Amino acid sequence: MPKIYNAPAGFEMNPIGTADALTALRRWKGTHAPRLEALQGLKDHYQAEAALGKEARTSLASEREANAILTAEIEARNAALMNCARQAEALKRACGPDPESGQAVRNAKYQAISTTAHIALGTVRGPAAPPVRNIADYEPDDEDWLENETACGRCSGAGTDPMSDHLLPCPNCQGEQRP
């Protein structure tokens, strides 16, 4: 019997009876069809996962590029802030014994600029902000909570003067409001 090339193992074509060959092919397909379908399903699944992997790699590469750009921008901002702080500190001059002289006032302004830049950089800690009073902190059954509020109108109960960046006591309540 002649052999059919690329035919499954055990399948030979009978030149006289193609019906036998067709029956054998149907038998082979019926026997191996569930395996073939399972293999096709696995192939489709892994091809889909490979496509997702390619997409993830592309996304990761674009995120890395974006992070590199952001890092460069942050480093440039930090360098500019540090340069600003150093230049402001370099402008300070001796002011003599008078704390209210023009040079002393300028020195204080230069120091404020330098300190603000250092706070933005995170190299020094800034003043603590007063606690924010939220309406949700009050009991819902307390109907006259606005009338009973005893907090200072200037410092909102923090006890520090907001006009001096909360470094000095409040001139209205003399810092007695602090919890």
Image (spheres, rainbow, N blue to C red):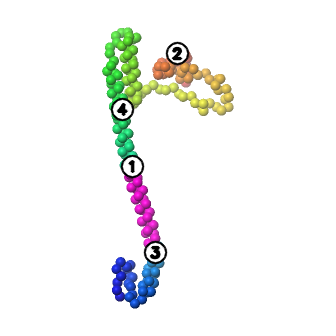
Name the disc covering residue 171, or none. 2
- Looking at the image, is mark 4 or mark 2 nearer the viewer? 4
Q: Quadrant of residue 45?
A: bottom left
Which residue is under mark 3?
Answer: 33
Q: Nearer the viewer, residue 115 or 109?
A: 109
Q: Earlier in the sequence, mark 1 or mark 4?
A: 1
On-image quarter of the C terminus: top right
Residue 101 x/y as whole percent: 38, 10
Q: Amino acid at mark 4?
A: Asn
Whichever of callouts 3 and 1 sits on the residue coming sooner in the sequence is 3
**Three-letter code for the amino acid on which mark 2 is drawn:** Pro
Question: Which mark is first along the chain, 2 or 4?
Answer: 4
Q: Which residue is mark 4?
A: 78
Crowd tier of the residue under label 3, counting other residues whose Cα lies within 10 Å: few below 14, some 14–19, many 20 or above:
few
Q: Which residue is mark 1?
A: 60
Which of the 4 quarters of the picture holds residue 76?
Answer: top left
